[in-house]
Image (spheres, rainbow, N blue to C red):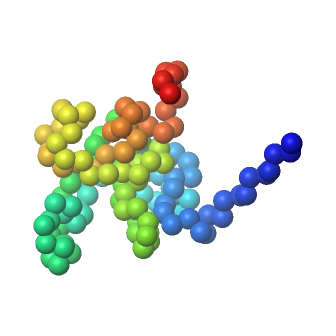
Amino acid sequence: MSKKKATPINASEIRFSIIKQRGSPTEAMTMDGRKVFKEDHIVCQNPLNPDPETMKKDLIMVKCVDYHGEHFVYMDPVNKVGGWFAWCTCGSPAVIIYGMSAYSGMTDSMMLACFFHAQFGRHVTTVSNKRFAG
């Protein structure tokens, strides 16, 4: 039985900004050619706003989790319709977490964090010798 060759990815059809390569701990270049920078905080719509009609007016400042030079989270500068709003330079979506104990050293109640790191304790690109039970 022959294996079917994989179809190459057409970057122009991707609806979000993926990091092409890791940059310095403070900046990186997305696959669509946008430079992104490490920030201490981002400004975004309040995800806890109970009134969606005023969502555009209810902007909040959210602290970005500091991964100490390995990766950083950022707002997608392209912000395409149907795309995700924030990413980690490891390639994982970034999410706003509220009161998560994994980041107990942080004092802010809402933080922008790498989804993969929050779930599994490591970034997508982190090499791990751990074997996960299936």
Image-based side of 60 in relation to 5, left or right: left
Position of 109 relative to 69 (above/below): below
In the displayed orientation, state which residue is furthest to the right. Answer: 1
In the image, residue 68 lies at what x, y percent? 34, 35
Identify the residue at image location x=66%, y=64%.
10
Percent of width and height locating residue 90: 47, 44
Q: Nearer the viewer, residue 56 or 120?
A: 120
Residue 9 visible in this rendered orientation of the protein? yes
Which residue occupies the foreground of this view, 106 or 48?
Answer: 48
Q: How many marks?
A: 0
Q: Nearer the viewer, residue 52 or 88?
A: 52
x, y percent for residue 116: 40, 41
For image coordinates 48% across by 39% down, the residue present is 124
Is residue 26 visible in the rendered image? The answer is no
Residue at the image point whose x is 51% and y is 22% from the top: 131
Q: Is residue 49 above or below residue 73?
A: below
Q: Quadrant of the N terminus?
A: top right
Q: Is residue 127 left or right of residue 76?
A: right
Question: Quadrant location of residue 86?
Answer: bottom left
Q: Position of residue 30 (x, y in %)?
A: 51, 58
Residue at 26%, 52% in the rendered image = 96
Residue 6 sits above or below residue 99 on the image: below
